[in-house]
Amino acid sequence: MLEETLMNHVKKISHQKDMANKSQMIVKGCVDFFSFQRASLFSYSCLTGVGEGICACTSEDTFSLHNIKEKIHDIYPIHQAVIHNKPIYLTIQHAKSSIPAKYVKRFSISSLAIIPMMVNDMVIGFVLVDPIQANESVTKNDLMKLSHYLKLTVSSTSDSAPPSYLLSKRETEVLQYLANGLGLKQMAPKMSVSEFTVRDHISSAIRKLGVNHRTEAVAVAIRHKMII
């Protein structure tokens, strides 16, 4: 059972209206209430297979990860975690051999745990957490507790508003274009992608928002001020 102070933190997350602050509170909880030195939040689209950075937190600072965008299929352990919706722990050796070297160097990655986040039976994001000590193992119990915490943050958010902080930039962009009355043929050249890719982004946004069609997705996005 999660302690009372952590449950109060989850409640605060559910009441937070600003999506950037909500994202930061989620990763901050991973650091403040669990034995991790850093937590990083990413969105994920099962249709495009792309993971995009949102934000990260340490005990001293919170910072943006918006410049990170990768095909998750190319990063085997993260891909396995999201397609099977199962937390995975990587030892130092496994992390350094399977995570792209540019990120290992940039973030001084040692061991690492990957925790998927799910809404409406679909993985929409994941959190990467670094243990406080480089050689410190993460137990199954640790992963279960953290996974439960993240599940609570997403479910509490979904009860009050859709998890827009996990919509990718492209998904938000296509919803805005739809709201402006643009069709696929008009959106594709503006986004420098094919009409098929535009359709994929729309479908992913619809699923993440838990609605059935484009019109409803746009209405929900406007109502919750994701777009204007």
Image (cartoon, rainbow, N blue to C red):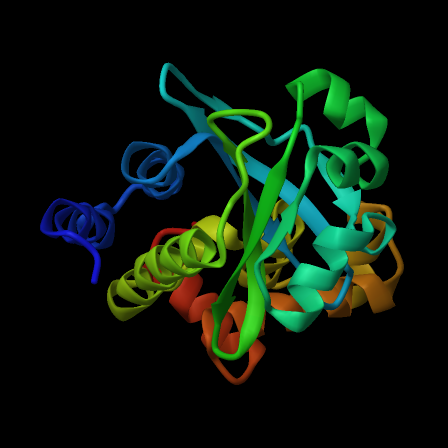
> Is residue 216 rendered to the left or right of residue 202?
left
Counting the numbered discs, the total is 0
Looking at the picture, how far across and down is residue 157, in whole percent? 30, 60
Residue at the extreme bottom = 212
The residue located at (83%, 56%) in the rendering is: 73
Q: Nearer the viewer, residue 206 or 65?
A: 65
**Does residue 3 lie above or below 22 as drawn?**
below
Q: Nearer the viewer, residue 67 or 192?
A: 67
Looking at the picture, how far across and down is residue 177, in whole percent? 62, 56
Quadrant location of the N terminus in the rendered image: bottom left
Can residue 180 be seen here? The reply is no
**Does residue 46 lie above or below 215 as drawn?**
above
Can residue 112 be seen here? The reply is yes
> Is residue 141 rendered to the left or right of residue 112?
left
Tell me which corner region of the image, top left, top right, bottom left or bottom right, holds residue 27.
top left
The residue located at (37%, 33%) in the rendering is: 31
> Is residue 83 rendered to the left or right of residue 221?
right
Looking at the picture, how far across and down is residue 137, in whole percent? 54, 40
> Is residue 134 rendered to the left or right of residue 90?
left
Q: Nearer the viewer, residue 142 or 52?
A: 142
The residue located at (51%, 53%) in the rendering is: 166
Looking at the picture, how far across and down is residue 145, in whole percent? 36, 57
The residue located at (78%, 58%) in the rendering is: 186
